[in-house]
Amino acid sequence: MNRLTPRLMILAASIAGLVACDDAKKAEQAQENQVEHAQEAQKERAELTQEQREEQAKLSREHAEDQHDLAKDQAEARNDVVKDVNDTTKEIRDEQAKLTNDQIELQQKQQKERADLNKDQAEERGDVTKDQVEQRNKDAKKVAEASNDVQGDRAKIVNDKREKLRDLEQRASELQTKAAAAPADEKTQVTTSLSGFPTKRQALERDIEALNSVTAANLNRATDKVEKELSSLDKTLDKAESRL
């Protein structure tokens, strides 16, 4: 038993040595693996960083291109807006110019129409005035003719009424002469019947003379009054004559 122990111890030591060696190799291998992993990771990180830089550069280029395109589009949009504004401004100015021309033409047309209207009205007034003058002349002529006719008729009427009054006065004078030679009672009756004759004759004479100055519109009425007064005197004479 004792003889085996050293061998076992050597074997154990050998095994332990082998194990230790194996562990050292494993440790070394593990360390190498770690280094490799670290290098690979670093490489991967480097590759990743390069890709990121490339991707970033690509994004920057795309962004720059987008910015350029956007700036181009904005510039084109501004140019379009400016062009539209200029076109619109030109259209507005053209429209304003057209409106101004239309207003000027309208004013000229209205002025011409007013001038023509004033001319026509002046001509019409001239024609109306001429017609009025001619009509007034005609009316004046008619009035003058009518006045002459009235005056002629008036003179005839006055003369006729005067003659009738003279006839009545002649009858009254003859009647008084007859009454003077008649019996007293008949004379009294005749005198009584003729009592109002002088007053009526004087009034009738004034009315006959008034026919010369009465207006044409009142001539017929005044003539009728004179005629009634003549008739009243005639009836008075008839009554007095009947007393003889």
Image: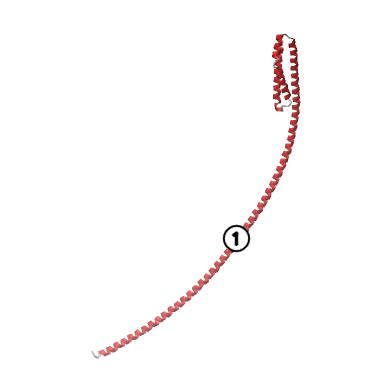
Residue farthest along the left direction in this orientation: 1
Residue closest to the eye, 196 or 70: 196
According to the image, label 1 marks what residue? 85
Residue closest to the eye, 230 or 51: 230
Residue under the point 56% across and 65% down: 74
> Quadrant of the rendered structure where residue 155 is?
top right
Q: Residues within 10 Å of mark 1 (few under 14, many from 20)?
A: few
Residue 43 picture location, percent across and down: 45, 79
Residue farthest along the bottom direction in this orientation: 3
Vertical side of 38 occupied by 71: above or below: above
Residue 12 picture location, percent across and down: 29, 87
Vertical side of 38 occupied by 170: above or below: above
Residue under the point 61% across and 59% down: 89
Residue under the point 62% across and 57% down: 92
Identify the image quadrant of the C terminus. Answer: top right
> Quadrant of the rendered structure where residue 138 is?
top right
Residue closest to the eye, 228 or 40: 228
